[in-house]
Image (cartoon, helix red, strand yellow):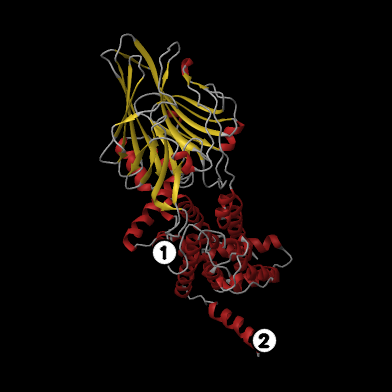
Amino acid sequence: MQDSKNLILAIALSLAVLLGWQYYFGTPMVDQQMKLAQQAAQSPDGTPNVTGQAGVVVPGQATATSFTSRDEAIAAGPRIKIDTPKLSGSIALTGGDIDDISLKTYRETVNPSSANIVLLSPNGSPNAYFTRFFWLAAAGSKATLPSVNTVWNADRTTLTPAEPVTLTWDNGEGLLFKRTISADDGYMLTISDVVEATGTGETTLVPYSVIRRFNKPYVEGTYVLHEGFVGVLGEQGLQEVTYDNVDKANPVAAGTGKGTDFKAAIGGFAGITDKYWAVALIPDQTTPFDATFQSLDGPAKIYQADVLLQPLTVKAGAPIQTSKKLFVGAKEVKAVDGYAALFGIKNFDLLIDWGWFYFFTKPLFHMMEFFFHWTGNFGFAILIVTVLVKAAFYPLANKSYASMAKMKAVQPQMTLIRERFAEDKVQQQKELMDLYKKEKINPIAGCWPMLVQIPVFFALYKVLYVTIEMRHAPFIGWVHDLAAPDPTSLFNLFGLIPWTPPAMLMIGIWPLIMGVTMWVQMQMNPAPADPIQKTMFAWMPVIFTFMLGTFPAGLVIYWTWNNALSVSQQYLIMKRHGVKVELWDNLGATFGKLFSKKA
């Protein structure tokens, strides 16, 4: 039967989307914290030398002392405190590393007493992650330059948005180095370097910045999210390179490690991104720079993003200066977009992985954010956006449901045709097609209501998955994080039994409600005569309930609400076209059988 085939096609397409989603994009978020807790902590011992552009030699890092804890590494030397509305931490005066950053407004879990997110950690601490800024000597120069062992002098003890810190160091050979570090109210630091010649002669120097991360961090490893190296490098555009791909790459021309280098880029940034956090070097947007993403082998694996600027010559009476910015913090959409506009950073908004459907995903986020500010709850924003999406697709859905209604209206004629031409399938199909043309029926129209949901489903999934605004965003009741699966489970009686089921059995209240709405939606149509189809339809809500159980709660809430709206919409359209709604008869038959069995 053609209409049954169309229904099966719609179901098959839906299953393909959801199964593909779970295979390629679905993340076992229930187990994520456990994996993070089990991540091995290794202490680095040192790093090799690397060679820069035109023979410029990047000074090697002295063998690092291994510390048993991050706190011990921080306490090992003098520091400048960082205190801004969003950041806390310190800058090491030995070496000048920016290597101690925590995020004041973000915590590890939804528990408000849990620890703040720690983003950067000093060299020598377990899983060190830090930024470093050098002046390098051009080929042939023998000038003594600041190194990892240099102890800088500071003009104050605390860096705040109102009070920049200036570090100075005199090499005793006629060069005076000054570095001013300023901070804003968000996640951007500005590093301005000046070198003055106090003696005779001239020296050519190269500004060099590096982000170093020791040991590969835990990554979720899904196709829907990029974690690793990221940058927009001039005309070479967006570059996203995973840790694994860097490890497998060829040796880079600019270093002893393996990876990829990019030459003479103008505009953009280079850095390392996690799901919600990022550290990015942002050079002057009008000056050419080289960038490298690489991994270095040693006692500990090092992942490094570096930026090398053009050489500058300093001589008496002609100081040189350079300025670069460092983004270190949460990938908040408003903050990232604001910095892109304020500083003219080329495509800085791509620091957030909006994906291939950027043109749809980002506007959907802004729509949800608008209603969030209106309602104060992202869950309610999802419900409102769902209504607006349904309204936008109403003309298409109306035609689809109207066509389905006509299909039901001509069902007796279709049955007669099939009986009359039971032995002649070719003539049977011809007569059916003539009937479709006469009644202006599109036999595949029933698939469209499901198909039009796919781009919305994908975009909403992407928004929930990658935007930090959705992280730990509560709904009502038991849902405290719309970006995580429903925390309840049928299999421990929603918390009454002190047992944590495995991820596949975390079938919470919202997935169950979704399954009920899907079952009700199926009751809108008469039961298929084919017993195989009937069994398939009966099990579909159960299958979808288990499949969506590990999806973000916000996505399940969207699907549930969308089902409820679809039932209402289909009911009204069928009544308008004078087609019998099978819902009440099917519900009566189902519950009648249930109660008769009990009796």
To which quarter of the image does residue 207 belong? top left
The residue sitting at the bottom extreme is 599
Choose between 434 and 514: the one closer to the eye: 514
Judge left or right: residue 575 versus residue 7. Answer: left
Q: Can residue 15 be seen in this view?
A: yes
| Above/below status of 571 relative to 195 | below
Q: Residues within 10 Å of mark 2 (few under 14, many from 20)?
A: few
To which quarter of the image does residue 529 belong? bottom right
| Above/below status of 159 relative to 426 | above
**Which residue matches tag 1?**
383
Q: Which circle's residue, 2 or 1, is located before the other in the chain?
A: 1
Amino acid bearing label 2: Lys
To which quarter of the image does residue 235 belong? top left
Residue 101, disc: none
Q: Is residue 330 visible?
A: no
**Which residue matches tag 2?**
597
Q: Residues within 10 Å of mark 1 (few under 14, many from 20)?
A: many
| Above/below status of 581 relative to 196 | below
